[in-house]
Amino acid sequence: TPQWTHAEPAAVDAFETAASKVQRAGAKVTAVELPSHFADLTEVHRRMMAFESARAYATEYAASRSKLSPQLIELIEMGLAQPVSAYLEDRRAQENAKRELTALMAEYDALLVPAAPGEAPEGLGATGNPVFSRMWTLLQGPNIALPVQRGPRGLPTGVQLIGAYGSDPALLATARWVEERLR
């Protein structure tokens, strides 16, 4: 993943543990290098989400802004500042990357990537940093997070399995197999 630098030691250990376990169980595990421009897709996702959120929440923003969270207001305002032409350029980048990933995935059952930068966050106030899921969400293929082990604070760390667009049933079967090997 282009976001590898965000992986904390607990995420690195979970990733390496998962790769090792499935390899020992007979899976062929190889490093895959994604096209270099995939590094930009996390930012493409963020901009598209802002643009679309600004339009989806336009009524709430206009009528009840004081009731919105500061994070949502910031996202909406970022989206309002974007020209339509930039959004359309991001959509083209999304579609091109989806095609590239589909072609790449013809050789693999799944990609194994970290699920999060580290352990799950404590409490229910937030779901954590989405840096490892943004690109895959943008590419609209199936992805499944699986717990691997517990980190230093006793909270789960895990991995994601990524499939090609439209490969949901196949990825579910692969995830079941991987999950059984991770137990």
Image (cartoon, rainbow, N blue to C red):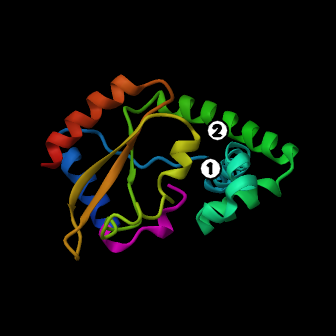
The location of residue 154, given as percent across then percent down, is: 19, 71
Q: Look at mark 2 in the image and give the residue it sits on.
A: 97
Circles 1 and 2: CB atoms closer than 8 Å: yes
Of callouts 1 and 2, the N-terminal one: 1
Q: CA distance from mark 1 to mark 2?
A: 7 Å
Write the residue at 75% across / 37% down.
Answer: 92
Is residue 125 one of those drawn in magenta?
Answer: no
Left or right: 59 in relation to 25: right
Left or right: 179 in relation to 137: left
Label 2 SS:
helix
For this orientation, the residue located farthest to the left is 183
Residues in magenta, as a range: 1-10
Q: Is residue 109 above or below residue 153?
A: above
Q: Is residue 169 above or below residue 59?
A: above
Answer with the quarter of the image where residue 163 lies.
top left
Residue 38 is labelled as 1
